[in-house]
Image (cartoon, helix red, strand yellow):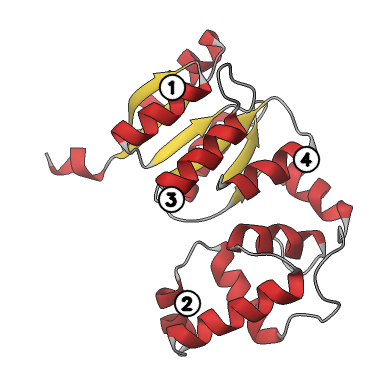
Amino acid sequence: MEEQRTRLRIVLAEDHTLVREGTRQLLAQCPDFEVVGETDRGDNAVELAMRLEPDVLILDVRLPGLNGIEAARMIAAQRPAIRMLIVSAYDDQQYVLEALRAGAAGYLLKTAPSAELIHAVRAVASGATVLQESISRRLAMRGDEGGGSSLEPSRRELEILHEVAAGKPNKEIAKDLRISARTVEGHLNNLFAKLGVSSRTEALVVAMNRHLISLED
């Protein structure tokens, strides 16, 4: 029974049956994973997420009924504790940015090795943000898209942002850096203003675009 409680509960949302079945079989090989639900529609993915409250939801971008990005946005608004990983055939940068802004914690291509998918599931479940290396490089090449202040983040703000990239909450960051949680919050608010964003995920995306941080650091 103890083993059951430590498993990561996963829901799959993929409209191609062969891909969904192959993913399920791959995840079933991991003793710390348990696939508790699956669907081929985006609207059903939202319903399953609300009802089953999995640890990780694996979503395709293009799903009937409701696309993966719209589904992620709805789930993030109602069940923010659910970690969402987009696994898509499309590496369009706009899809990636929209998915992250909608609340996804990671984005992989369907061409990724099976070991990378398994690693990504565990990583997003632990609170980290995961991007396939090729996607990370392409986003970094975009440069700054504009918006925000011309002021550069301070050394301490970047230090905190690295902690955010590792998926740590404010209290844990405060403990690691030996400052108060209120101070961490203040630094993050200043950082958001400088980058012209309103969330941690957007801050990571913009900072990466501006070569201020790398998810591989």
Q: Are marks 3 and 1 in contact (CB under 8 Å)?
A: no
Residue 166 appears left or right of 4: right
Question: Mark 4 sits on what residue?
Answer: 94
Return the residue found at the far top.
Answer: 17
Task: Give the residue type at disc 1.
Answer: Asn
Residue 93 appears left or right of 175: right
Instruction: Report the mark closest to the observer, 4 or 2.
Output: 4
Task: Give the residue type at disc 2.
Answer: Ile
> Which sits earlier in the primary sequence, circle 4 or circle 3?
3
Question: Mark 2 sits on what residue?
Answer: 173
Decide which of 126, 44 is in the foreground and name it: 44
The number of numbered discs placed on residues in the rendered structure image is: 4
Task: Please tell me whether residue 41 is drawn above or below residue 200 in the rendered image.
Answer: above
**Element on which disc 4 rests:** helix
Task: Give the residue type at disc 3.
Answer: Pro
Q: Residue at x 43, y 48 (%)?
A: 125
Question: Mark 3 sits on what residue?
Answer: 80
Q: CA distance from mark 2 to mark 3?
A: 20 Å
Give the percent coordinates (x, y) of residue 186. 56, 84
